[in-house]
Amino acid sequence: MEDYKAYAKEKYDRTYFTEFDKLLEGRTSTASQQMAERRAQHIAILETFCDAYEKYDNQINATDIWNAIYSAHIKRKAGAADLNELNEEIIEKIISGAQSWKKSSGHVFEDFVTRYTKERLKKKHIRLILQKDLTTMLHDNEIANEADDMIPEMVSSEDFDLYAVLDLNGDNIVFGCVQVKTSIRDRVGRDRDFSIPVMQRHFWSAAVVLDGTYLHMPKFNAMVNGSGGDNYKYRENGWHGMYALSNMEDSDRIYRDPHLDLLIEHAEEAAKKFASARQRFDQYWKAISTLT
């Protein structure tokens, strides 16, 4: 299955250069080129991951595909066919490529999660939306939560990447917050501190992680599931559930979920609980999975 790397590079390069030329529209200024490059690489990463993840379904895991796209991105930024022969200029381009990947890849993965779940959640009258989209809906008075829910304050804090919105008899109700990470090690302690208060305010709090490798470590596992006892820092659960696309098996509130089927099922269950018995929808609520 090594051809997935070649496939990812070819798809990434073709998409990037097509989109770059389209976005540039003949302009030559440095600002125009930088804007076109940022947008084109975002589209190229997203389209390549979506396409390759579907093509190699159940054959290559999400992390390996993601890393293949990262390699393609670095090679494009380096502008060298053979990275075995490095010089100072190429090294600087590689560093630049790594920095641009770090800035854009997280946002790409957020877009992937929304796109990948959109049609399935729509059937359940649920949407996962980006922070900017929720901000627009608030501005247009399209969110029907009570003032006590403090949705504008929640959004302005920028503590969450996606928001779960339920269409309840024609009203848009925010019932959950979702953190989206390519790796669980990325500021996870900080993210946990944001998650617990929203659960205590009776919202659903979930996290989606592309690479679940670090969840095998007791510390990170305890951050999600809690460790029990009175003397450990992570005594209680940090999320209602965490959903890993790859490199993790089920462990209490951590779910191996390569197609995000469980995320969708649990979102529906959380929405029903929020709408019917919200005061019992606390930090310790746990979805009852029917999928195997």
Image (cartoon, rainbow, N blue to C red):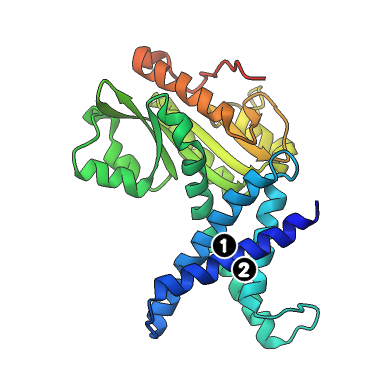
Image position of 13 with respect to 284: above or below: below
For the point 65% across and 60% down, the residue is: 69
What's under tag 2, amino acid-wise? Ala
Q: Which residue is mark 2?
A: 98
Q: Please identify the quarter of the rendering in which residue 57 is found.
A: top right
Q: Position of residue 232 (x, y in %)?
A: 65, 30
Kindly state the secondary structure of the residue where label 2 is placed.
Answer: helix
The residue carrying mark 1 is: 102
Q: Secondary structure at mark 1?
A: helix
Q: Nearer the viewer, residue 36 or 252?
A: 36
Question: Would residue 171 appear left or right of 94 to someone viewing this image?
Answer: left
Q: Three-letter amino acid code at disc 1? A: Lys
Where residue 11 appears, as percent x and y from the top left, is: 62, 61
Q: Tell me if I can see residue 184 in this picture.
A: no
Which quarter of the image is occupied by the C terminus?
top right
Q: Are marks 1 and 2 in contact (CB under 8 Å)?
A: yes
Residue at the image position 49 percent from the left and 48 percent from the top:
110
Determine crowd level at label 2: few under 14, some 14-19, many 20+ residues with C-alpha closer than 10 A: some
Separation (CA) of disc 1 from disc 2: 6 Å
- Left or right of 275? Residue 261 is right
